Amino acid sequence: MWAKSHPSGQILAIERTSEKYAKFKRRLDHHPDVQDRVFAAHADAAWLVPWLSETIDHCFWLYPNPEPKRRNHRIAHSKLTSLVVEMIKPGGQLTIATNVESYAEELRVELPRRFNLELAFDEKWSLDRGARSHFEKKYLARGEPCFNLEFVKY
Ligand SMILES: C[S@@+](CC[C@H](N)C(=O)[O-])C[C@H]1O[C@@H](n2cnc3c(N)ncnc32)[C@H](O)[C@@H]1O
């Protein structure tokens, strides 16, 4: 979907599990038309992201595991978040989507407090805009709210 609406953009998907990476790679193999612009990395983001300092215009962090009992694994408190913010160019965007209202609220409050991030858009994603990921498709089909927060790095 993103590749079609951004015909000159390049996008990198990062997934650490073999199973989910293989699934995405299989889908990508069936779309030779976008293979010069859509890339898949089988890696832990914590290893890859530090190599990408200030090179990324827009990062999509869609439906992170909610981690209700592991505070330090949630985006607002994770060490990975500072690396992710560092990889985004100044003026670039960080979009985070979640179906968990309390998770969205924590992000609204904590990210602008802890990082050079300003909340620019705060909305619910709807089916008419299309699903951007497998989990988004599933949640929208169930009628669950999909909170979409877009931060700008300054
Ligand atoms: C709830 S799923 C959402 C997947 C996809 N973004 C979507 O919206 O359909 C979260 C995914 O993040 C992956 N993940 C979590 N931490 C990661 C990390 N540090 N590096 C790479 N992938 C990670 C998990 O393996 C899992 O596949």
Image (cartoon, rainbow, N blue to C red):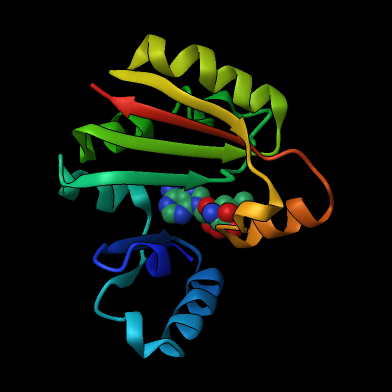
Quadrant assignment, res 141: bottom right
- Count the labels in the image: 0
> Measured from the top left, where is residue 43 in percent x and y?
36, 61
Q: Nearer the viewer, residue 62 or 122?
A: 122
Q: Nearer the viewer, residue 120 or 133?
A: 120
- Relative to 41, is 63 on the left or the right? right
Question: Going 63% across and 26% down the picture, which residue do you hit?
Answer: 103
On screen, 133 above or below 19?
above
Give the quarter of the figure containing the C terminus: top left
Quadrant assignment, res 67: top right
Question: Going 46% across and 90% down the picture, which residue do you hit?
Answer: 30
Q: Residue furthest right?
A: 142
On screen, 40 above or below 90?
below
On screen, 21 above or below 32?
above
- Relative to 73, is 51 on the left or the right? left
- Relative to 26, is 35 on the left or the right? left
Question: Going 57% across and 59% down the picture, which residue do you hit?
Answer: 133
Question: Going 41% across and 70% down the picture, which residue do you hit?
Answer: 4
> Measured from the top left, where is residue 78 in percent x and y?
43, 29
On screen, 150 above or below 24?
above
> Measured from the top left, where is residue 149 in percent x and y?
52, 31
